[in-house]
Image (cartoon, coloured by chain):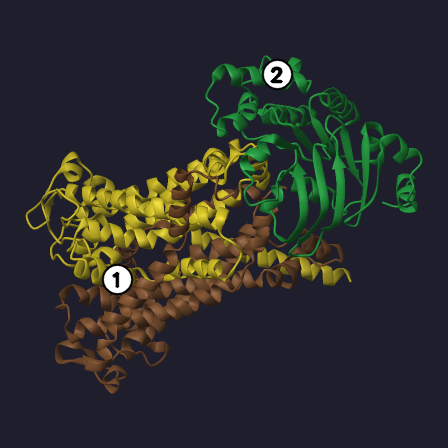
Amino acid sequence: MNKISIQNFSLQYSDGTESLRNISLEIPANQITVLFGPAGGGKSSLLRVLNRLNDLADVTHQEGKVLLDGEDILSLKTDVIALRRKVGMVFARPVVLPFSIRENLTYGLEVAGEKDSDRINGSVENSLQQAALWDEVKDRLDDPAIALSGGQQQRLCLARVLALEPEVILLDEPTSGLDPISTGKVEESLQGLKQDYTIILVPHSVQQAARTADLAAFLLQGELVEVASGDTMFTNPRDQRTQDYVQGRFG
Amino acid sequence: MKSSSHLRYKQQQFGFSLLTIMTFLTIIPIAGVVIYILVLGTPAISWEFIFGFPRGGMREGGIWPAIVGTFYLTLGTAAFAVPIGIGAAIYLSEYAPDNKATRLIRIAIINLAGIPSVVYGLFGLGLFVLFLQFGTSILAGSLTLSIMTLPVIISTTEEALKSVPQAFRTVSISVGATKWQTIRKIILPQALPGILTGVILGLERAAGETAPILFTVAAFFLPRLPSSPLDATMALPYHLFVISTQVPGMPIKIQYGTALVLLVFVLSMNIIATTIRSRARARRQW
Amino acid sequence: MDKNITRHESLITFFIKSTGYSAIVFVGMIFIFLLLEGLPAIQKVNLATLFSSRWYPIEDYFGLLPLIGGSLIITLGAILIAVPFGIGSAVYLSEIAPRWVRDLMKPFIEILGGLPSVVLGFLGMLILSPFLRKLLELPTGLTALTGSILLGGIAIPTVVSVAEDALDAVPKSFRDASLAIGATEWQTIWRVTLPAARSGVLTAIMLGVGRAIGETMTVMMVTGNAPILPKGINDLFSPVRTMTATIAAEMGEVASGSVHYHVLFLIGIVLFLISLIVNITASAVVFRQKKRQERILS
């Protein structure tokens, strides 16, 4: 069974800016699934449905089903807080909280009520290791996180998600503000992470999509145009619109 | 062409000078007031003047009961206005939907800020002193002053909360924090200096006001310290009003001394508030 | 989501939501109390008396006109002072002064806003009023003019502060565009920046008016408190009495429930309504929102 199953899902914001129409998509575990397409296509919206962050936005209409491990996360009975711990998210701009590096990592556990200090300390090192940041910051964990470089901050944001030991990681253009070297580091750690996590990435370029995708989904103006494996999608897409976009004719 | 631009330049020179002079004409009297009271009030200041009780029909002795009274009133005002004001600001900044009810709240706050202080006095007299039978007391005065102070505290606190970047909220929610956890652990600590500034500026206004306490607290002459919130008390602003208008033969020195103490009380609050604000701005990480 | 928040959190949320509505409750309560205590005056005193020009409560003359007139003439005088000086200073600070002068002066002007009005009244009595008496050779220095000057000073910080914010919120590109086509800075100020900020400047003036008309202690101490209906601009040089000063001076001495007591509350209603109109007009303007949005990241 797939990790996430999106079935006939539609969504509309009150100002009508961006919406999703009848999306159906199966997202497998332990792979990198890439949602790509031109701006305004609904990629971020779809991502924010998966951890119910859209609850904060002005959504007027929503229908269809989104199943995580077979359970509908859109149901009223869903424990949204628990869902967000299970489905972590990294944003386009690295937003570090106005705390120390260590506190950025422990914040999620702390608000979850975790008291066990061994577990908290363990998760600090563990998550930094996984995000390939440990060696750079291990001697200054109590410094303000804002002092880190942009690339380091974004990896800290990734580590902050990992510290919660989630099952799914959502990344919304996580490298859009980063230089090529930092981007490479983030992409590399994603490849390492997919053994343990289900990763859903909105890339900041078609090239990144091609580099990282195990499975790729092309979204255009709120519609899911095509889903294919990464290899097929970027070499031999079925749909003309996908082909035009991948070859850089628009977008 | 050349002469026209020359003329325009002259015109600008003249205009700029005029505005500069006007600004200084605004500033100088302010400085004048403060310096004048400092100079004429300082000779009156002594241990006895600050810590003594008034004697001889207030023409001798000190103003300690008035200082203590104003201090209690300020504390009492804080006790009511701070929790309600900060709560209301959190509501407006973090919870309030963009609808008619919220707009009504905002209009109410603006109106609360504009109601003349003497009308607050009437209201306090009608509700707290007479209807609820608190009598002329610190309790009645503090309640009256705290309603008057609310709009200042609410609007400055809301401003401080809103200046905390939205992204912090999104991130906090996305790692599974509840709304209140986000407010308590991130937004309030980040907005704290701004909130403190607003609270102190609000209390400063309460400490210096006379009209709202005329009929709710103030005792003309009461040479003892209040022992409960239901006692009346002397207060600095009212005392200055009394000794400068109601008591014939009042030594001028005592009048200036009282004005100085009141001014120092109020201005030091103002300076503390401004210092907190500018320090926090310099240290801010976002 | 609602199901999962703890009891603790729902209690706090309840508290926050109830405080959110406190402002409405308080404004409502104030208005209701004023009505309860003030409306009986209309039953007990006939309207012709209320609209007469004689205020002499001891003999049951409750004419409100001299008090309203007194408030208006003093406010008018205050505005004639506060508007040019307030807007002038705001333009100077926002458009002309070097940055450091502005950073130094703005808090300084705001300090005047924090000076207790009783201190200004005190100095007005001791210094300004004897000075004006000698200068203008008046029989008394306790006149409407003295009150106007002090009230102008009290209103200026409000006007400067709000107007300066409004000018500051005008995008720099407006000024650049004007300078680029050859206007001088002076022309840019009058033809571009001030008009662009006009709603904020109007708000500043309205708030200044509100501040002046509601001021109590200062006017009570310096205007002589004679309830005589001002008939022209010449009456600036005579003593007057305002609505606020009347309440402040007389409320302490009336028996609660007496006709005089109710009439004083009626004056309170008039003041409340004036401030309501002034502030709703002023708040119709939302120029500050833009500035706030710019400040928020993301």
Q: In the picture shown, does residue B139 fall above or below C244?
A: above
Apparent colour of chain A: green
Secondary structure under badge 2? Answer: helix
| Rendered image quadrant of residue A147 | top right
C166 relative to C56 in the view: left or right: right
- The percent position of residue A232, horizontal first and vertical second, equals 90, 33
Q: Nearer the viewer, residue C143 or B285?
A: B285
Q: Front-most of B36 and A25?
A: A25
- Tell me the brown chain: C
Mark 1: secondary structure? helix
Kind of residue at disc 2: Asn
Is residue B129 shown above or below B84? below
Count of marks overlaid on the render: 2
Q: Label 1 is placed on what type of residue?
A: Phe
The reply to whether residue A59 is in sight is: yes
Q: Which residue is mark 1?
A: B123
Q: Which residue is mark 2?
A: A126
Q: Residue drawn at (12%, 68%), measured in percent from left and top?
A: C255
- Residue at position x 41%, y 60% from top? B108
Q: Chain of mark 1?
A: B
Q: Position of residue C45 (x, y in %)?
A: 20, 82
- Circle 1 residues within 10 Å: few <14, some 14–19, many ≥20: many
Residue at 43 percent of width and 64 percent of height: C279
The chain letter under disc 2 is: A
Chain B shade: yellow
Within-10-Å neighbours for mark 2: few <14, some 14–19, many 20+ = some
* Residue B143 relative to residue C184: left or right: left
Do discs 2 and 1 belong to a common subunit? no
Nearer-the-camera pick, B72 or C104 = B72
A170 displayed left or right of A116: right
